[in-house]
Amino acid sequence: MKYENINGNDIHPKLAGGKFDYSLFDCRVMSHVDFARLYVQNHMAHFTAFDDLCDASAVLTLLGRMPVFLRPVQTAADDVRMARNDWAHCVFAKWDQTNFLQRFSEMEHLVKTMAPAIAGKLLGELKDWETKGIKKVTDMCSSLQRIRT
């Protein structure tokens, strides 16, 4: 757990070798956000709420690592996180139509595993994004084809 991510613990000077002196830390977990920050990498711990500004990678990391989530949720979240990282870091060699559709399938699986009671609404939105994404990619390919000729 990364207690340096809460209560300003990251400002304490480090010991020789670059390790924190944990005896100086305030380890009180004051909120659900503090609790979540214990499970993410330091650069991901700057969120203040679970809202639109909270990084998707941080949320997926939490779903995949926090022991409160069942193993199927953790596995599904890890699958989505790995694909999200390839997309966010522009690993274009891994993105083709088959991969694109597979990633949507993985996101659908995560939604169904995590929130079966509200899956219908979320899956409808996800399908809309998938459809619009395929149209965008198709339009871009057509444009590139016209430019080349």
Image (cartoon, rainbow, N blue to C red):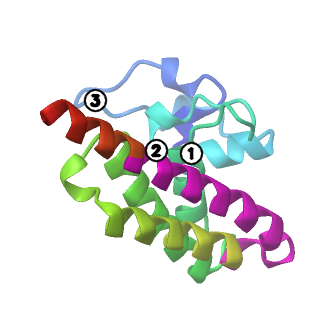
- Three-letter code, disc 1: Ala
Q: In whole angstroms, how far apart are the C-alphas of marks 1 and 3?
A: 29 Å
Q: Is residue 135 above or below residue 106?
A: above
Tell us which disc is closer to us: 2 or 3.
Answer: 2
Tell us which disc is closer to us: 1 or 2.
Answer: 2
Q: Which residues are magenta?
A: 113-138
- How far across and how far down the image is residue 78, in percent? 46, 66
Q: Is residue 48 above or below residue 127?
A: above
Q: Quadrant of residue 99?
A: bottom left
Q: Residues within 10 Å of mark 1 (few under 14, many from 20)?
A: some
Residue 70 painted magenta: no
Q: Residue furthest right?
A: 117
- How far across and how far down the image is residue 58, in percent? 54, 45
Residue visible at 58% across and 82% down in the picture: 72
Report helix, strand or loop for mark 3: loop
- Three-letter code, disc 3: Gly
Counting residues from the start of the chain, the first of labels 1 and 3 encountered is 3
Q: In whole angstroms, how far apart are the C-alphas of marks 1 and 2?
A: 22 Å
Label of residue 136 in the image: 2
Q: Which residue is mark 1?
A: 56
54 or 23: nearer the viewer: 54
Quadrant location of the C terminus? Answer: top left
- How far across and how far down the image is residue 135, in percent? 49, 50
Q: In whole angstroms, how far apart are the C-alphas of marks 2 and 3?
A: 47 Å
Whether residue 28 is visible here, answered yes or no, is: no
Q: Residues within 10 Å of mark 2 (few under 14, many from 20)?
A: few
Label of residue 18 in the image: 3
- Three-letter code, disc 2: Lys
User: Disc 1, disc 2: CB below 8 Å?
Assistant: no
Report helix, strand or loop for mark 2: helix
- How far across and how far down the image is residue 43, in percent? 45, 32
